[in-house]
Image (cartoon, rainbow, N blue to C red):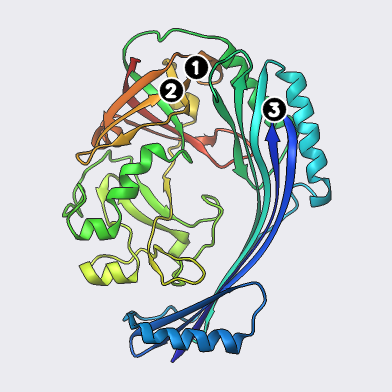
């Protein structure tokens, strides 16, 4: 019998913001532990929140073997690694007052807008170890500063978002970002023309990637339920398009290992390379079941059995800045788009509730609601422009994904 322990600790202080004022403050400390035992190609799992006695937890996991949950895969072993990304962003004892000062400044700078949502400072620790010399540890601290805003004269519930998630903070830089967006929002423009535009998404905006999240899931791929099924080795996309599954610390705020203790070389795995489909994403079970490459994409709750799940995606950036990718053309920056999706055939459409015209350096004004249309093969094939080498915002790692798309008024 082998034993494996998964542990996570989360400390969080969250400020709820309503009408540009602090409404409430909540602090949360949660420790969760899961113990897995493996015997006779079966897995038993037991979990607990808070303090525990390991021998009691182990006994519960052993009893869970009677559920006859199969696990026929080789356990991860002989890898010791620690990643510590914890650093002071805002001292916790100063956090609430800093949020208060930030909101006061926003109220002064943008009096015609009301801001709301939550601002959260989080610290997390995750570890996975077993009796086969696996010992992986990850710790991180990050700020989630994402505010919705509403023009006080608007009848809408929400008019847009501004914010970021990252390991850095600077009040002046964030105020500058909000001012750029809000000043552009005040300048209502007409859509210059109907037709093809260069459209910019933040690389951490999930909507353009939804077809890859769905279609590159190894389970759907292996059962031939995906439009990408059976196309490994084929040139499907632009030769400059490379898509990674990633747990690299520069790409995401997550452990560098998956739920089965798999660590990829360089913390990334190429699913599409230079436009050629290399692999769907898989865990050990799906890789074995369909004879697919194993990409280390297992997820699970602390008290669950590992299963295939989505990890962060990252597109290889170009050597060009966002301004260079735009090339002097009129571009549209998508701030808020809700209600869009891909069809099973890969056709894409979405309304954009807030799109700003962008000249390569500045937001010049707000467009009326528009409609974007394309297909997954055009978006990342002939109409793929690239991902910017420079960041959209100094405090975040997000970059600009530029795609030519058909744009029409709603």
Spot occupied by residue 34 in the image (x, y as percentages of width and height): 53, 75
Q: Are marks 1 and 2 in contact (CB under 8 Å)?
A: yes
Residue 86, above or below 70: above
The answer to whether the residues at label 1 and label 3 have Cβ atoms under 8 Å apart is no
How far apart in space, not on screen, are marks 3 and 2 (Cα)? 36 Å
The quarter of the picture where residue 287 lies is bottom left
Instruction: Give the residue drawn at x 61%, y 12%.
Output: 153
Q: Which residue is mark 3?
A: 19
Residue at (22% x, 41% y) in the render: 344
Q: Which of the labelled discs sits on residue 326, or is there none?
A: 2
Please say whether residue 136 is visible from this viewpoint.
Answer: no
The answer to whether 367 is drawn above or below residue 161 in the figure is: above
The residue lying toward the viewer, choosing from 208 and 15, is: 15
Mark 1 / mark 2, whichever is N-terminal: 2
Which residue is identified by label 1?
Answer: 359
Q: Is residue 309 left or right of residue 90?
A: left
């Amino acid at each position: 019998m082998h034993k494996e322990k998964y542990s996570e600790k989360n400390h969080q202080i969250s400020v709820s913001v309503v009408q540009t004022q602090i409404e409430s403050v909540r602090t949360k400390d949660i420790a969760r532990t899961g113990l897995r035992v493996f015997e006779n190609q079966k897995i038993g799992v037991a979990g607990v929140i808070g303090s525990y006695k390991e021998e009691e937890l182990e006994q519960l996991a052993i009893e869970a073997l009677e559920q006859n949950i199969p696990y026929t895969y080789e356990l991860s072993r002989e890898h010791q690694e620690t990643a510590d990304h914890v650093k002071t962003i805002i001292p916790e004892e100063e956090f609430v007052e800093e949020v208060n000062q930030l909101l006061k400044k926003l109220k002064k700078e943008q009096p015609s807008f009301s801001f709301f949502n939550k601002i959260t400072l989080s610290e997390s620790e995750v570890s996975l170890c077993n009796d086969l010399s696996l010992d992986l540890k990850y710790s991180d601290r990050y700020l989630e500063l994402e505010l919705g805003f509403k023009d006080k004269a608007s009848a809408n519930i929400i008019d847009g978002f501004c914010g970021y998630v990252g390991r850095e903070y600077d009040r002046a830089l964030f105020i500058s970002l909000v001012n750029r967006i809000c000043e552009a929002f005040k300048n209502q423009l007409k859509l210059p023309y109907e037709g093809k535009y260069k459209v910019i998404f933040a690389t951490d905006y999930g909507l353009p990637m939804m077809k890859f999240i769905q279609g590159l899931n190894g389970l759907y791929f292996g059962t031939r339920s995906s439009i990408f099924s059976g196309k490994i080795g084929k040139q499907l996309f632009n030769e400059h398009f490379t898509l990674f599954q990633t747990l690299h610390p520069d790409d995401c705020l997550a452990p560098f290992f998956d739920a089965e203790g798999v660590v990829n070389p360089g913390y990334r795995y190429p699913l599409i390379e230079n436009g050629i489909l290399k692999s769907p994403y898989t865990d050990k079970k799906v890789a074995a079941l369909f004879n697919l490459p194993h990409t280390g994409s297992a997820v699970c709750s602390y008290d669950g059995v590992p299963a295939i799940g989505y990890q962060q995606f990252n597109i290889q950036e170009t050597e060009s800045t966002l301004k260079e990718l735009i090339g002097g053309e009129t571009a549209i920056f998508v701030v808020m788009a809700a209600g869009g999706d891909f069809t099973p055939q890969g056709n894409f459409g979405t309304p954009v509730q807030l799109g700003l015209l962008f000249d390569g350096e500045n937001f010049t004004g707000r467009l009326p609601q528009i409609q974007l249309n394309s297909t997954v093969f055009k978006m990342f094939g002939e109409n793929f422009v690239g991902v910017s080498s420079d960041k959209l915002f100094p405090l975040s790692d997000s970059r600009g994904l530029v795609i030519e798309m058909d744009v029409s008024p709603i």
